[in-house]
Image (cartoon, rainbow, N blue to C red):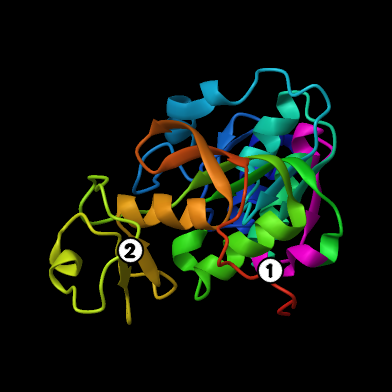
Amino acid sequence: MDARSDPGRHLKEQIDSLGPWFQNMRIGGVETAPEHFLGDYPNFKWQGFRHVIPDDLEGRSVLDIGCNAGFYAMEMKRRNAGRVVGLEPDPRYLEQARFAAKHEGLDIEYLQMSVYDVPKLKERFDLVIFMGVLYHLRHPLLALDLIYEHVADDLMLFQCLQRGDERLPELKENYDFSEWAVFDRPDYPKLFFVEERYANDPTNWFLPNSAAMEAMLRSAGFVIRDHPEREVYLLERGQRHYAVESPTFVCG
């Protein structure tokens, strides 16, 4: 029996031909990355914070930045989201996302764009998803500023890999120029710069500790509404820090 007479086998061959997959998804009952080093990723993570997103999104618009193969975009569409757009700079992941959405009959628009391109959309979204992207960026604060300035209208679901101390310190608003000791505190906001590789990935650049991550989000104008599990935040658009300049250019 060849693949043409065995639909399940043919589907698996199609999925394998698009690999390797980073997101383990189930397309027609076939897993895309069953041997993922993190397990059933990202589904097992999603189960820990899915409750912070309404079961019925009532036609609200969603932008998934760095969507990979489209796991979160598809979940939002299944929750009755209206317009859903996924941005992905990697053409292989983009092909995977389009294949998965088409097979599952989900109307999702996928565009080959990075977070630095969001001003080109000229559109704001009710929910922005920005999961697992920030630590891969050379310009993380610029990315947050561009999202705030151009595409975030209400909520953002956010995750970033974090390392270092997880405590949130109580800090003064200002320190004298002669102050050095505060910077030696393990809980002081820190971004660890990876010059070469972390986890064998040359695109891991900045790893914040918890204090730095939350401070960066606040300075970009986001308010933490919920923190359902480690590294994951549900944010709402608030007021940007008074010293932050609006980004006025588009990279690309």
Q: Name which residue type carries label 2.
A: Asn
Front residue of this view, candidates 217 and 206: 217
- Tell me the quarter of the picture where residue 115 sits: bottom right
The image shows residue 6 at horizontal and vertical percentages of 69, 35
- Looking at the rendered structure, the secondary structure element under dot 2 is loop
Residue of label 1: 246
Magenta region: 102-119
Task: Look at the image and say whether residue 135 sits in the magenta stretch.
Answer: no
Q: Name which residue type carries label 1.
A: Ser
Q: Left or right of 165: which side holds 240?
A: right
Residue at image position (58%, 35%) is 30
Residue at image position (75%, 31%) is 77
Which dot marks residue 174? 2
The image shows residue 15 at horizontal and vertical percentages of 63, 48
State whether residue 168 is above or below residue 197: above
How far apart marks 2 and 1 lie (CA) works out to: 23 Å
Q: Report the quarter where the C terminus lies.
A: bottom right
State whether residue 33 is above or below residue 19: above
Residue at image position (25%, 72%) is 176
Q: Left or right of 20: which side holds 14?
A: right
